[in-house]
Image: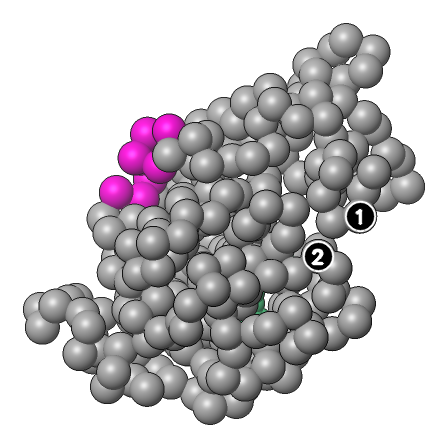
Amino acid sequence: MIRVITAQLPPYHPWLGQIHYFDSIESTNTQAKAMAINGAPHGTVLLANSQTGGRGRMGRSFQSPPDSGIYMSVILRPNCLAGQLMHLTCATATAAVEAISASTGFRPGIKWTNDLVAGKRKLGGILTELSASAKGQVDWVVVGIGINCTQEEADFHPDIQDIATSLHLCTEKTVDRAAVAAALIAALEKMDRTLPDANAFLPRYRADCITIGKEISILRGEEIRHGHALDVNDQGALLVQFSDGHREFVQSGEVSIRGMYGYV
Ligand code: BTN
């Protein structure tokens, strides 16, 4: 697998010699964090054929069966402050959309902040993790991307059968996982070259973000608030107009879009 992927990258690609492939691993993000703590260099790529404990945002799991998806994490060491990377998840999502589009011809949407979607279903997700010094200087970031590639609907666990999809289901074609993985590595390296500059990503993020313009609900702790999503700012925060008329930038919390993932 790894040779098939590297064969599709340019011979001078700066990350070529540091791509680690695992047949099965608990979580590429967890492993990448451990490797980052132990000094793994900028641009270390971890790719797995399956994960036994794939993780998503908000403590959720990410189903990662063998031979079915792309489960990738990359260690980056950008020379900037953590506060300059508020848009990192958005930048990664944009890179993933570009990679999927370039390698399959299918362009997914993005559900703020980190879900890759096709129609009303989830195609994949992004999990970014960061460590910084007490002064805020970034030590490392791990960007993790999971993309469902080859699954038929029946392959998904019954819990997510109604809300998940795969590139195969979207394109009705055989999906070349190695081609998608190579495109993803190329897109992430390109992202890295302009990273602290939000202008390099946010215009495309806004264009692909299906949340903007929708009726949404935001769950934070026990509280649910309803509103209308208006925009995403350069820090990746969602501008929401709440039912009582006031506007607020939301940086975290579970956002549901009316009509998606079972929210009616
Ligand atoms: C989400 O849906 O909330 C994010 C899912 C992120 C999954 C990817 S798969 C590769 C990397 N390793 C993990 O454990 N998670 C990310």
Quarter-of-image position of residue 44 = bottom left
Mark 1 residue type: Gly
Q: Identify whether 247 is placed above or below 199.
A: above
Does label 1 or label 2 sit earlier along the sequence?
2
How far from the left and from the top, in percent, is residue 102?
29, 54
Quadrant where the C terminus is found in the figure: top right
Mark 2 residue type: Ile
Quadrant where the N terminus is found in the figure: bottom left
How far from the left and from the top, in percent, is residue 45?
35, 72
Q: Identify whether 18 is placed above or below 149.
A: below
Residue where numbered disc 1 is placed: 262
Q: What's the residue at 49%, 84% (across, down)?
A: 67
Q: Is residue 188 something that shows in the picture?
A: no
How far from the left and from the top, in percent, is residue 152?
60, 73
Q: CA distance from mark 1 to mark 2?
A: 8 Å
Query: In the visual, does 107 lie left or right of 68?
Result: left
Q: What's the residue at 41%, 77% (across, down)?
A: 47
Name, please, the residue furthest toward the left. 12
Name, please, the residue furthest toward the bottom. 23
Q: What's the residue at 52%, 27% (across, down)?
A: 232
